[in-house]
Amino acid sequence: MTEIKLPAITKRTLPTLESLTKALSVPRDILASDDEIEAAWINMPRVLKKIPPQLRTEGLARMCVAVASGLFDSAINYAWNSAIIELRQKVRKFGLNVVRQAVGRTDFDEQALLDLKDAELLDLCLKLNLITEDGFFFLDQCRDIRNNFSAAHPAVGKIDDSEFLAFVNRCAKYALGDEKNPVGVDIQAFVAAIKDSRFSREQRDQWVDRLRRTHEAQRELLFGTLHGIYSDPASSQDARLNALSVSRQFANEFTPTVQSELIDRHQDYLAKGDTVRHTASQQFFEKLSLLGLLSEGERHALISNACKKLFSVHQAFDNFYNEPPFAERLAQLTNQGAIPGTVKPELVETIVTCAVGNPYGISRAAYPYYQRVIEAFTPAEIDIMLLLPKSKTIVGNRIRSETKCKDGFRRIVSLVDPSSVPTRSKKVYEDWI
């Protein structure tokens, strides 16, 4: 960087400030003292040298004039405005189209960027890896100082020359400078790789390692990005599988913030009536065994639909051959969190009907899935199951009229844990055992 030499103006400006305050009959100490102005003026070139020449704009020129006038509160406002303008420019250079994909906002355009509050802009820059975690920390402090001690708002106090120089130094180093973040994921390269061809295990592990080494804020952003890619109907199957493969490595470690972000995105699809993305998003949660994060109503719908499909296949031709994949999916759904009480009767009846089978037998390939679900029955579900033999249902009629089905029911009753049988159902349970 070239040396910056500011003109020696304090000998002329300081007497002028004294005369001005006397003329207005206001105390001289409403402005910075002569010593503070001189100290700030002498040390400013060292700070300004950190700013690339092309970024030494009119805002910084106004900042210098404000310092010479003893208006440190106005000076930090000019410095902050220059920092915010440059951070916005960094986001533009990053690519608004990539930002849209990363943050999951299809409406993120130039106006949306300009509408961001300063705190939101800092958070976005951290997530996009445009500033470091240290940079975020210090710039966020600058934001707080600017809001409380600058001329932008009624100030709660005054800052001295050392505090002013520290403020400008942070803006120069972390917002206006050319500092590169050594830690983090290149989001543009990451999204491009996800959307390219199917990952090999080595390629997936490489990206997983980079995600583990980046800071938490960017990691949280990228999990949302992966969810968005998976849910996007325009994504190729390779891209969706890549997004799922990487996400699966972290699913058990998702923080409450990540979980909240994913749920917000999922609910946003529903609110907008985007059924295609909403359905794909449900699949994303299901594949990662995170259905427990969804609302009870959604889980009811998923389990109920799976029951209906399994029951339809069970009643159709060649059911012994066709049941396994439907039984497997229903078993996977029931293994992800508590089952809503509203769907328990349908679930129990479907599983027991298929497990009991028909006069010709059962689907042996599907039976292990039925067994797994039955062994996990809660007391409420066991109670429902033990009432089925006397019910006016298909399985009730089979148990009462077919010996093979009656024996099949006795066999599945023996699968439940005796300690889980409700007191009111003990007698019925013992009769079957």
Image (cartoon, rainbow, N blue to C red):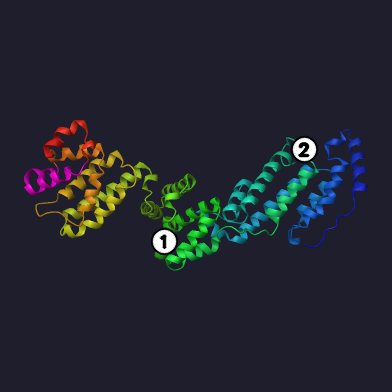
Front residue of this view, candidates 416 and 6: 416
Front residue of this view, candidates 56 and 433: 433
Say whether residue 115 is left or right of residue 311. Answer: right
* Secondary structure of the residue carrying numbered label 2: loop
Residue 240 tag number: 1
Say whether residue 102 is left or right of residue 68. Answer: left
User: Do labels 1 and 2 touch, CB within 8 Å?
Assistant: no
Q: Can residue 228 be seen in this view?
A: yes
Image x and y of residue 207, in percent: 49, 61
Residue 204 found in image quarter: bottom left
Question: Which three-letter amino acid code belongs to the residue tagged 2?
Answer: Lys
Image x and y of residue 12, in percent: 93, 47
Quote the CA–CA distance across marks 1 and 2.
54 Å
Say whether residue 136 is left or right of residue 34. Answer: left
* Secondary structure of the residue carrying numbered label 1: helix
Q: Main secondary structure of the magenta part?
A: helix
Q: Is residue 234 visible?
A: no
The vertical placement of 390 against 47, above or below, is above
Q: In which quarter of the image is the N terminus?
A: bottom right
Front residue of this view, candidates 335 and 202: 202
| Magenta stretch bounds | 393-416
Residue at 26% across, 39% down: 378
Q: Magenta span has 414?
A: yes
The vertical placement of 374 against 428, above or below, is below
**Chain-order first, disc 1 or disc 2:** 2
Q: Quadrant of the C terminus?
A: top left
Mark 1 closeness class: few <14, some 14–19, many ≥20 residues within 10 Å: many
Q: Magenta span has 76?
A: no
Residue at 41% across, 65% down: 238
Q: Mark 2 points at which residue?
A: 158
Image x and y of residue 46, in percent: 80, 55
Q: How many labels does the image show?
A: 2
